[in-house]
Amino acid sequence: MIRVSAVLIFSLLFSLGAAAHVGNPDIYMEGYAGPYLLYVTIRMPQVIPGVAEIEIRSESPDVREIRVAPMQLTGPGSKLAPTPDIARRSAADPQFFTGSLWLMEFGSLQVHIEADGKRGPGELAVPVPAIAQRTLPMQRPLGLTLAALMLLLTLGLISIAAAAVREGALEPGATPKFENRRRARIATAIASVLVIALLFIGWKWWRAEAARYEANVYTPPEIGAVLDPSGRLALEQKPTRMALGSSRRPAQPVDFKLLIPDHGHLMHLFLVRLPAMDSFWHLHPERDANGEFAERLPPVPPGHYQIFADVVLKSGFPITLIGQLDVPGFAGQPLTGDDCGIVATPLAQSAAGEIAFLLPGGGRMVWERPQTPLRANTALLFRFHVEDRDGKPARDLEPYMGMAAHAEIIRSDAAVFAHVHPAGSVSMAALDLAQARLPGAATGAPGTAPMNGMATMNGLEAQPEHVDPEISFPYGFPKPGLYRLFVQIKRSGEIETAVFDTIVE
């Protein structure tokens, strides 16, 4: 047996990772609020409670007002919306709205969006996994100011106690006697001890609160992997605790047996060979009789692989587990079902800037990349189009697991990983939970679907027969660096993967 433990040295590297993605907590989504197509960006706070910044762009100019409110994704709170805040319309761009929302709880939340315009009202729900990404240190000037004020108040309290004993009972203008001054010195000593004791108790309380909060800072859970000589990969979810609800509650154990399917699968497993990123596999392990996930690997080339495993908890909270795997040479099983993979040019040898990729089945995929440099922390719409062998728009595209396409975005050091779809970076299973509670969702009223051609949670219903050759993904790079994009489509029953590299400033 070849035993491979979950990566430990990467845990610090990924400590700022967000649920369902690694290294990028922000939310990017394209969806319909009734008849209005909206592009939503949610800049998540680094701490909870914290303020999320909301950016919404309407595709059409006839939206008059947008209101936003935070809610729970599931449970009683998902039916009790607070009074929404009115988003601010940009004076320079009337189709752009911004707002700020307090997120008060950890766990599965949603931002409820109400749009109103010439074509009537519409609603959209954006699932939001709320996590603490870090603890914020106190700014040095503020710390020095508070320390000075504390010293002033401490001396003031002691002085007041001494003055009250020494002069409190004297007539105006009388000089304190020796006995009064002696009692004042005793009072000063007693007051000093009491004040210092109170300060010590307050310091201990502060440290305890800080430690409790620090324990709630989210880090991507680890996953262990055992690969036997026949190529069977067994995955073991390591015990994990996660903060849910109030920030004062202790972290609770995560039950990975309570999962819901996303695109028809309980787990999406990604294997990326490092450091070249030249071997990429998107697999779907099944649960065995013991409740653990297992997969017979296809002919994966030997090497050292980074593991990313996407799952969605029953609450709608998406999680990406991380690990490492060393793969020896073996024959492997043929790819079946929705599994796919590609062996591409090593990242270091590729031209970061190539916009066309030749597809195995003929034709090519072209990235309509902006002419201006790509910048971090900027909402982008990644546009691709697929051509056939004759350079014409391909007409043989089919839904792949209920979507027009899937894309995985990975930074060269593997510190950023995102699994996105034409609807954005949100989990589709969580999005279905959110959309199901909107008015008209049960009846299939027009405008209640998150996007054109969107399938249901399992990715098995309401699929269009064909997919448009124009594909887009809303997303934003969280930090500068060299990135590799894997874009997966399905053509005439075959899954194909295109590979693009880009530099982000």
Image (cartoon, helix red, strand yellow):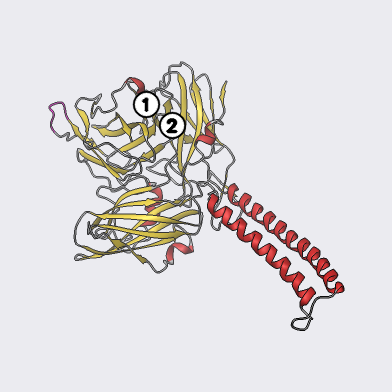
Q: Does the magenta stretch mainly form a helix, a strand or a loop?
A: loop
Q: Which residue is mark 1?
A: 335
Quadrant location of the N terminus?
top right
Quarter where residue 394 is shown: top left
Quarter where residue 117 is shown: bottom left
Residue with the most extreme bottom position: 171
Label 1 vs 2, first from the N-terminus: 1
Q: Nearer the viewer, residue 138 or 185?
A: 185
Q: Residue at 76% of width from left, 75% of height from top?
A: 164
Q: Is residue 486 visible?
A: no
CA neighbours of label 2 inside 10 A, class few (<14), some (14 to 19), many (20+): many
Q: Is residue 19 visible?
A: yes
Q: Which residues are magenta?
A: 388-392
Q: Is residue 59 above or below residue 332?
A: below
| Left or right of residue 128: residue 497 | left
Residue 297: x and y in percent read: 44, 25
Q: Nearer the viewer, residue 135 or 233?
A: 135
Quadrant location of the C terminus?
top left
Q: Nearer the viewer, residue 336 or 188?
A: 188
Q: Residue at 69% of width from left, 63% of height from top?
A: 155
Amino acid type, callout 1: Leu
Q: How many marks?
A: 2
| Left or right of residue 206: residue 166 | right
Q: Are marks 1 and 2 in contact (CB under 8 Å)?
A: no
Residue 368 within the segment the image draws in magenta: no
**In this view, the mark in front (1 or 2):** 2
